[in-house]
Image (cartoon, rainbow, N blue to C red):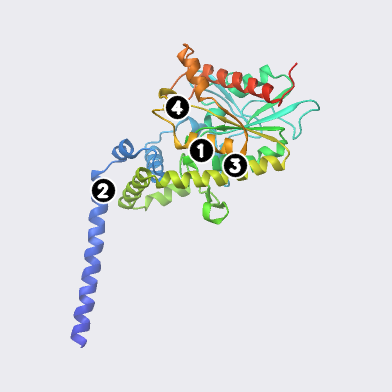
């Protein structure tokens, strides 16, 4: 009996050592044979693990993108714009923020002056105005044509609709807006599915009444130290699993379900402060390159269904952008719009506000 036990123990140790050796071999092979560049070319944008690997590679190569130079770490939101910025970016474009990390040089009181309609613009980099200067954003241009308003640009690059919601609840409501305009970009919905995109971020738990997870959000140093000991083979499995979920439609189903819950909470928060909600669909990329017959994303369908079901004030600018471009109006496609795109947004929001009676027409 003793000899059998000894032999069994020896076999168990040998098996464990072999398993450990196999894991090490697989890890070395994956790191040697499968590069982050190859993964990004084949699986880009469909997994938070992929975004994490790209961030890790950029950190190693000491590459800093434009958004990183604008942002600071935030334990609750992941990141926010740095306060009191005055930079020159994007071919000599001026980028400024005030003392409360709001784009623009002007500081605002917590309440608007009498007779002034305060409009809060919330959203991601399209709302913030990436690649355009201070006087080119649609928030700035809208302010110029609606003198009886105060348009505040709360956009932050890279935000998902979950971060937009949390940012609104924590910061925007303090300014007591009369109207809250959500700049809806379809990428923002998928970002809400991940705890890492441009950087670590909070994530809302669909199964726990949108409880916030990944708090406090880890900073760059913590993320780097965690990634140092993470298995690349496990990362690749996660990337492949993300691709399977994407292709089977499971990711889309979960994304729409989470988006519905986030939108319900956002609308309730806007109503709670006595403000009017306006949803504006901001088109880009395939939205403008293709017709509705060839491309009508799940995110755009979600936008239209929510607007119809809840009878919301909504403005889908995709058709208007396509009409304008078909008539020769130049709008950059494949990235952020330049000045002309922002001018179109301001034009149509102004017209919509006047039609809906949200602003005083002089």
Cα separation between marks 2 and 4: 37 Å
Whichever of labels 1 and 3 marks the residue nearer the N terminus, that label is 3
Residue of label 1:
302
Tag 2–tag 3 contact (CB < 8 Å): no
**Which numbered dot is residue 287?**
4
Residue 51 or 241: which is nearer the viewer? 241
Q: Is label 4 in a helix, a strand or a loop?
A: helix
> How far apart in space, not on screen, are marks 1 and 3 (Cα)?
17 Å
Identify the residue position indicated by label 2 in the image. Answer: 30
N-term mark: 4 or 1? 4
Q: Nearer the viewer, residue 192 or 92?
A: 192
Residue 300, percent across and down?
49, 34
Numbered mark located on residue 165 in the image: 3
> Which circle's residue, 4 or 3, is located before the other in the chain?
3
Q: Nearer the viewer, mark 2 or mark 3?
A: 3
Q: Do the residues bearing badges 1 and 2 touch, measured as CB atoms within 8 Å? A: no
Mark 2 vs 3, N-terminal side: 2
Height in image: 19 above or below 321? below
Look at the numbered disc 1 and give the secondary structure of its residue: helix
Q: CA distance from mark 2 to mark 3?
A: 39 Å
Q: CA distance from mark 4 to mark 1?
A: 14 Å
Q: Report the mark closest to the observer, 1 or 2.
A: 1
Which numbered disc, 2 or 4, marks the residue that appears first in the sequence? 2
Q: Position of residue 267 (x, y in %)?
A: 64, 41
Q: Is residue 116 above or below residue 78?
A: above
């Amino acid at each position: 009996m003793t000899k059998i036990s000894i032999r069994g123990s020896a076999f168990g140790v040998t098996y464990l050592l072999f398993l450990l050796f196999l894991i090490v071999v697989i890890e070395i092979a994956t790191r040697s044979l499968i590069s982050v560049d190859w993964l990004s070319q084949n699986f880009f944008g469909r997994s938070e693990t992929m975004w994490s690997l790209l961030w890790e590679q950029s950190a190693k190569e000491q590459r800093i993108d434009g958004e990183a130079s604008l942002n600071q770490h935030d334990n609750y939101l992941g990141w926010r714009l740095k306060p009191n910025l005055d930079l020159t970016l994007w071919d000599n474009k001026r980028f400024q923020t005030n003392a409360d990390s709001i784009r623009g040089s002007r500081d605002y009181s917590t309440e608007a002056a009498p007779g002034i309609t305060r409009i809060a613009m919330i959203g991601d980099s399209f709302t913030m105005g990436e690649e355009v200067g201070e006087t080119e954003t649609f928030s700035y241009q809208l302010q110029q044509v609606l003198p009886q308003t105060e348009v505040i640009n709360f956009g932050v690059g890279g935000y998902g609709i979950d971060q937009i919601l949390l940012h609104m609840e924590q910061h925007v409501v303090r300014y007591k807006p009369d109207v809250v305009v959500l700049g809806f970009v379809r990428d923002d919905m998928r970002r809400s599915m991940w705890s890492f995109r441009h950087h670590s971020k909070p994530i809302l738990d669909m199964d726990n009444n949108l409880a916030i997870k990944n708090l406090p959000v880890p900073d760059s140093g913590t993320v780097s130290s965690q990634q140092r000991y993470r298995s690349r083979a496990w990362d690749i499995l996660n990337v492949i699993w993300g691709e399977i979920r994407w292709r089977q439609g499971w990711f889309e189903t979960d994304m729409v379900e989470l988006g519905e819950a986030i939108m319900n909470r956002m609308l309730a928060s806007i109503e709670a402060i006595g403000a009017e909600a306006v949803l504006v669909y901001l088109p880009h990329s395939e939205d403008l390159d293709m017709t509705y017959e060839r491309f009508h994303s799940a995110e755009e369908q979600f936008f239209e269904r929510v607007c119809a079901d809840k009878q919301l004030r909504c403005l889908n600018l995709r058709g208007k952008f396509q009409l304008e471009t078909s008539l020769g109006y130049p709008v950059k496609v494949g990235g952020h719009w330049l000045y002309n795109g922002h001018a179109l947004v301001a034009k149509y929001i102004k017209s919509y506000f006047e039609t809906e009676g949200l602003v005083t027409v002089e």
